[in-house]
Image: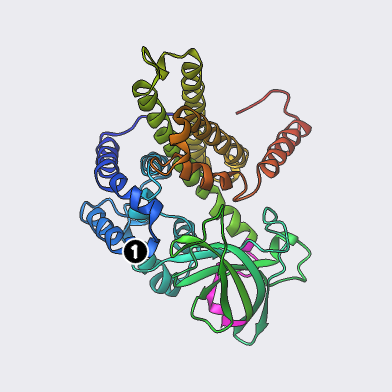
Amino acid sequence: MDFTVSERMQTILGMVEEFVEKEIIPMEADYFRRPFRELDPWLEAKRDQVKQMELWAPLHPKEYGGMGLRLTDYALVAEALGYSPLGLYIFGCQYSDAGNIGLLARYGNEDQKERFLRPLVEGRIRSCFSMTEVEVAGSNPTWLLTQAARDGDDWVINGHKWFTSHADGAKFAIVMAETNPENESRHRRASMIIVPLDTPGMHIVRGVSVMGHVGEAWDSHAEVLYRNCRVPRANTIGEEGQGFVLAQERLGPGRIQHCMRWIGVCNRCFDLMCNHVRRRRRTPDEMLADSDVIRTYIADCAADILSARLMVLNTAWKIENLGVKQAMKDISMIKYFVPNVMQRVIDRALQCHGGLGMTDDTPIAFYHRFERASRIADGADEVHKISVGRRFIRDYDSGRTKVKW
């Protein structure tokens, strides 16, 4: 496996890192204190700058206006953009849009690509992904109460979702609903359906308060009701009953994107910590950096971050070269390993900053509040650990006698 960064990618990364440092980080103080919509004109101006630099939508298809980077290259860009909470949004590769773009690019028909994919990649509209339900385990995508019933050439959708992130102001949702309840395989019962948000029967009930933050626009999570919500069956992505397969396809590369962004968070907190302890006195004669305890914090963080980073790059390489199916253990491992590394790094950085770390004068408190969800989103840690253990045991049951990474 060769993780050598090409000269082209070194140039791209240098441009991205410089833009984040000079153009995005200065906006963070306003982002932490002001409503998202108040910042929208400034954010759009930054997005226009990125487009002019030809750095827009780095992961997304060239034919629709993106850069079309391969996954391993994009992983490095996501790390650089994760250095700021606004990085991915300003570069047009924010979740949930990134996952929806991947689905539509691979499985959408030509009409869906022109109506929904193209304006989404170009940044003219936003979207959301509506899978998690209130009453059932979000980590089990084969168990859905939301139903889409056939009525002629239409689907009639009824159900109750929440954590439909970024629904406020979005133009459409991709809804996962049970369409084939009679199918013997529970993995073939659901489909993914495009639902424009102005469709009658699609109701945003509220913005869900997360750690005391309701948010708005892209920076929000919605509870949604579907009540006799009627859309054409032509809005189905891929084949009927393919919803579970599409969910796995969406979440595999999506976890790479999240995990490399989280490495960026780790890098930011590590830099803040190291710079702070060099400046902050603990006595009139000594800096915090002179403390052996602080030095162990730094050493532990460095080892954690490097381990997580290499695991993610290895997983990206496997997805790119061997396919998602061959990388399933790796995908599950980074999903629980990287968030735990990030939490440890954030916590050590906060501890080193003392009272300052509790304020919004640095992004550390923001990360402490909002990145805790990383160990729950896309499946709780425990679900992924069980999956990894089961897959290894299955390998040994089938005849393996030695570990193979």
Looking at the image, which is closer to me, 280 or 102?
280
Q: Residue at x 67, y 58 (%)?
A: 141
> Along the line of sight, which residue is nearer the eye, 226 or 360?
360
324 left or right of 286 in image: right
Position of the C terminus, as image quadrant, is: top right
Q: Residue furthest bottom?
A: 152
In the rendered view, tell whether residue 355 sits above or below residue 121. Answer: above
Depth check, front residue: 81 or 205: 205
Q: Position of residue 363 (x, y in %)?
A: 41, 42
Disc 1 on helix, strand or loop?
Answer: helix
Residue at (25, 47) in percent of width and height: 23
Residue 383 in sight here: yes
Residue 231 lies in the magenta-colored region:
yes
Q: In which image quadrant can residue 181 be found?
A: bottom right
Type of residue at label 1?
Glu
Q: Which residues are magenta?
A: 228-243
Q: Quadrant of residue 273?
A: top left
Q: Against 263, is 378 above or below? A: below
Q: Mark 1 = which residue?
A: 38
Q: Extreme left residue here?
A: 52
**Left or right: 93 in relation to 56:** right
**From this viewpoint, which residue is outermost toward the front?**
284
At 64% from the left edge and 49% from the top edge, which residue is drawn? 379
Q: Quadrant of residue 184?
A: bottom right
271 to 53, vertically: above or below:
above
Residue 398 in percent (x, y) is at 76, 34
- Is residue 310 a member of the stretch shown in magenta? no
- Pick whichever, 384 or 185, lies toward us: 384
Q: Could you tell me residue 148's position as x and y percent?
A: 66, 76
**Does residue 122 appear anywhere in the picture?**
no
